[in-house]
Image: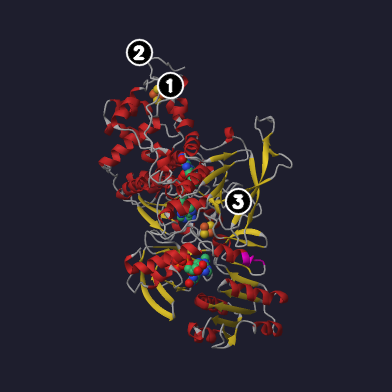
């Protein structure tokens, strides 16, 4: 059992949890994830590590309340316990001095991006950060990321804050030479940014979020096509060369259980808190 | 040569084994309850009567852990079940499991002399009978040796790790089992379906091991959470056992394997058994099975997957296998169970591609017909494609069951650990790896094998670790 020590609401339906898991905190690195299961009947869900405090034994992550499990998780309070957490899983990000790094994060993934930026900054990189969300009220960590970046941009889908959409990035990469680009967010963001950096040959690292079960290479549900080769995202990734990922396939596979996921969330909401 | 008719003591040999009651096929394909129901006391005693109590029992030779088979059968005859189970447990710590899933027809029962004139004694069913009797009555917790103050870390809670943990705990060592999943048992829990091995039994065995004082930590991924080196230093363990088993599923590398509706057998079975998808939406993890399912491969794993698919409501389940029926690697009993339940066998058939619809769901499978060559020098007949025999079949679910590789994480993160080309870990005859204090056993050493061989390896490694710890104890000034 893992105790939740702190809960914050970063934006509507986006929560930040700090849990007590000293053995994971001790080893966690940017780019890695955990898999949690709320109770015996629950689903195993992967979440990216967004922070850790090795001394206090705390691991943090942020999540979007999108379906049954994340909504159920969102109801937990400080002092509640999560049945099991496995981790750290996946390969850590490559953190070293690259030079000029373009960091693009969208939605809930702004949270783990802050951790990346801190590490990249410490390694001596010059950061250009772009954070995006559907609407202005869904943005968070704006000041924190701004403070760590040499250049900072905001984008929203509806233009309610900063640039409207990510189109403006084209001009930025045309004007400035980047040594590396890191993208975290939903697939359309990963794909759009990869297409923008491709003509300039900027090495672009995307963090993939396919369906997962064990997270340790044993089931293969997380398989993705990268450069035409089959990879297991949980053990070969989760970060891959953004110019080589087959995004269409990834989106199709993410939607594999969409009917069942909706049913599960609906039944749970109808049954209220008693169910599950 | 063992005698077949004992000297005048018994007049007639009963050639037929007492059949084990089973759920009828049309009933059992609608539930996940255990198929074989087990002997009653009368049936067990009747079957035990068939044993000839050979002077030179051949059956023991076939038992990978050398159980004194005639002795425990004699106990059943005499109604002394307590002593019978004790005899088995001298050699096998997981009899309720082995009695159900061991390939007895290739082991003890293959050598039983009665097999020459009729059915061999049903040794497995008798083992199961005693184990179930014991579980129903409640386990006796054996006396533990006084604490040695030595600590052993066990990686993986499959049969090898569980056996080793129990043995070392009894000897007075402190044992901690690290398991990456949220439940113990390894393949016993996530692979073998409920209808062959009820999870209550695994739970009971683990409960017994916990009562011996063994601690289990779930969600610990050794290689990431701790390395082997850290276990031996920072974490203060005196020895480590690696029982991480097989994991990564193989795919054939043909077009369409990433379509939706194509599962590895491991994914399919993990969803069904570990995550209990057959209880969705009461349990949260979904699974989707279409009307027409193709299971690729013909081993035990393929049979398990096929039989799960039927129970999840598939109208037609095919086993697609490139060789012929007689080469199928699955246990005969499992092939028969699958056949009884209506699984269709498409032998001498090899899939070459899968095709999907516009949403990326698998809809068709292209196959080629195969034939077997004349036996080569080694006597093996290879399957080769028959030119231009390709055909297309409608299917909506594929389960690929063509084997699994050793779990690689420990090998990748442990400098100095000697590993074979196929990814298995090198050990000597005492299960020692190339690193002092580090032992390994089970599928991670042998490649995919059996529950009983993993258990035997755990037992052997426990003995070896015990000796090592005693020796080390003397050398330590404390
Ligand atoms: C390596 C990895 C890291 C992740 N990190 C984070 C994170 O830091 N924060 C976070 O909020 N989420 C993260 N995710 C996604 C998260 O695991 C899913 O959102 C979660 O499993 C949804 O569970 P649910 O039961 O609430 O929703 P479900 O009922 O499973 O799904 C609800 C909806 O979300 C969609 N969905 C489900 N899984 C994904 C996915 N993997 N990617 C995109 N959409 C999905 C479904 O299609 C559906 O529409 C990560 C996923 C992976 C594989
Ligand atoms: C579907 C299926 C059906 C089978 N049916 C039969 C049968 O009928 N009869 C029979 O005799 N055999 C059968 N087998 C084979 C048998 O189950 C295995 O040979 C046996 O379980 C191997 O035991 P093990 O202890 O080596 O490892 P496993 O049972 O594979 O357990 C290994 C454990 O280690 C854990 N692990 C792996 N890596 C790490 C890590 N880095 N850190 C922490 N934990 C880790 C895994 O999660 C797993 O729980 C079957 C196998 C399968 C897959
Ligand atoms: S089980 Fe078979 S081989 Fe073994 S003692 Fe009995 S009759 Fe002989
Ligand atoms: S999640 Fe199972 S192999 Fe990656």
**3D distance between C-alphas at marks 3 and 1:** 42 Å
- Scheme by which the image is coloured: secondary structure
- In which chain is the residue bearing label 2? B
State whether residue B97 is above or below residue A228. Answer: above
Q: Marks 3 and 1: CB-CB under 8 Å?
A: no
Q: Marks 1 and 2: CB-CB under 8 Å?
A: no
Using a 10 Å C-alpha cutoff, classify the residue at mark 1 as few (fewer than 14 neighbours), some (14 to 19) or many (20 or more). many
Which quadrant of the rendered structure holds the C terminus of chain A? Answer: bottom left
Using a 10 Å C-alpha cutoff, classify the residue at mark 2 as few (fewer than 14 neighbours), some (14 to 19) or many (20 or more). few
**Residue under disc 2 on the same chain as residue under disc 3:** yes
Which residues lie in the magenta part?
Answer: A244-248
Residue name at image x 62 percent, y 71 percent: A205
Relative to A66, A237 lies left or right: right
Q: Earlier in the sequence, mark 3 or mark 1?
A: 1
The residue to which callout 2 is attached is: B11
Residue B129: x and y, percent?
33, 34
State whether residue B285 is above or below residue B346. Answer: below
Tell me if residue B51 is in the magenta stretch: no
Residue name at image x 54 percent, y 88 percent: A160
Main SS category, magenta section: loop
State whether residue B168 is above or below residue A19. Answer: above
Tell me if residue A246 is in the magenta stretch: yes
């Amino acid at each position: 059992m893992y105790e939740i020590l702190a809960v914050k609401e970063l934006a509507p339906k986006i929560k930040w949890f700090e849990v007590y898991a000293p053995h994971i905190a001790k080893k966690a690195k940017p780019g890695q994830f955990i898999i949690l299961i709320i109770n015996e009947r629950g689903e195993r869900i992967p979440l990216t590590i967004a922070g850790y405090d090795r001394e206090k034994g705390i691991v943090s992550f942020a999540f979007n309340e999108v379906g049954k499990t994340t909504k159920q998780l969102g109801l937990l309070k400080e002092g509640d316990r999560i049945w099991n957490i496995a981790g750290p899983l996946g390969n850590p990000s490559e953190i070293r001095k690259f030079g000029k790094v373009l960091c693009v994060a969208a939605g809930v993934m702004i949270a783990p991006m802050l951790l990346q930026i801190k590490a990249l900054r410490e390694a001596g990189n010059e950061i250009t950060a772009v954070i995006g969300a559907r609407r202005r009220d869904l943005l968070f960590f704006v000041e924190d990321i701004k403070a760590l970046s040499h250049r900072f941009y905001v984008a929203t889908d509806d233009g309610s804050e900063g640039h409207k959409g990510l189109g403006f990035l084209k001009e930025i990469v045309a004007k400035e030479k980047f040594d590396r680009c890191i993208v975290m967010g939903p697939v359309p963001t990963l794909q759009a940014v990869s297409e923008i950096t491709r003509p300039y040959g900027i090495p672009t690292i995307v963090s993939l979020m396919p369906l997962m079960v064990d997270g340790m290479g044993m089931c293969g549900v997380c398989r993705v096509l990268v450069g035409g080769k089959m990879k297991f995202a949980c053990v070969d990734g989760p970060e891959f060369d953004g110019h080589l990922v087959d995004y269409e396939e990834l989106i199709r596979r993410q939607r594999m259980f969409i009917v069942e996921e909706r049913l599960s969330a609906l039944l749970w909401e109808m049954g209220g808190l008693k169910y599950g | 040569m063992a005698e077949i008719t004992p000297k005048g003591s018994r007049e007639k040999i009963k050639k037929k084994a007492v059949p084990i009651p089973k759920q009828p096929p049309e009933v059992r394909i609608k539930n996940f309850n255990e198929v074989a129901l087990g002997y009653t006391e009368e049936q067990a005693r009747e079957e035990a009567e068939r044993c000839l109590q050979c002077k030179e029992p051949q059956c023991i030779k076939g038992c990978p852990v050398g159980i004194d088979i005639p002795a425990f059968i004699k106990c059943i005859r005499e109604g002394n079940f307590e002593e019978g189970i004790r005899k088995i447990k001298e050699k096998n710590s997981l009899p309720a499991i082995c009695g159900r899933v061991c390939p007895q027809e290739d082991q003890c029962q293959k050598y039983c002399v009665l097999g020459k004139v009729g059915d061999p004694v049903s040794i497995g069913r008798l083992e199961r009978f005693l184990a179930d009797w014991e579980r129903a009555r409640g386990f006796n917790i054996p006396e533990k040796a006084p604490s040695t103050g030595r600590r052993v870390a066990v990686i993986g809670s499959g049969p090898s790790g569980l056996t080793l943990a129990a043995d070392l705990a009894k000897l007075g060592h402190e044992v901690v089992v690290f398991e990456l999943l949220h439940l113990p048992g390894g393949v016993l829990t996530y692979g073998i379906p409920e209808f062959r091995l009820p999870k209550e039994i695994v739970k009971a065995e683990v409960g017994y091991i916990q009562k011996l004082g063994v601690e289990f930590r779930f969600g610990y991924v050794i290689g990431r959470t701790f390395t082997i080196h850290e276990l031996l230093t920072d974490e203060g363990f005196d020895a480590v056992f690696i029982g991480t088993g097989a994991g990564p599923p193989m795919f054939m590398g043909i077009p369409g394997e990433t379509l939706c509706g194509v599962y590895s057998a491991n994914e399919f079975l993990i969803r069904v058994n570990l995550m209990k998808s057959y209880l969705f939406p009461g349990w949260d993890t979904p699974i989707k099975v279409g009307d027409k399912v193709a299971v690729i491969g013909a081993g035990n794993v393929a049979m398990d997957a096929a039989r799960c698919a039927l129970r999840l409501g598939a109208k037609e389940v095919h086993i697609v296998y490139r060789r012929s029926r007689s080469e199928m690697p699955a246990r005969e009993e499992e092939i028969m169970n699958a056949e009884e339940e209506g699984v269709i066998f498409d032998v001498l058939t090899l899939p070459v591609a899968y095709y999907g619809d516009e949403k990326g769901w698998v809809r068709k499978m292209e196959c080629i017909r195969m034939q077997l060559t004349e036996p080569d020098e080694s006597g093996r007949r290879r399957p080769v494609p028959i030119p231009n025999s390709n055909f297309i079949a409608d299917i909506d679910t594929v389960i690929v069951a063509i084997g699994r590789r050793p779990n690689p994480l420990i090998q990748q993160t442990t400098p100095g650990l000697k590993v074979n080309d196929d990814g298995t870990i090198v050990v000597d005859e005492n299960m020692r790896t190339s690193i002092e204090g580090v032992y390994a056993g089970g599928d991670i050493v042998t490649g995919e094998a059996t529950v009983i061989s993993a258990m035997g390896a755990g037992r052997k490694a426990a003995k070896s670790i015990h000796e090592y710890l005693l020796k080390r104890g003397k050398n330590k000034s404390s």
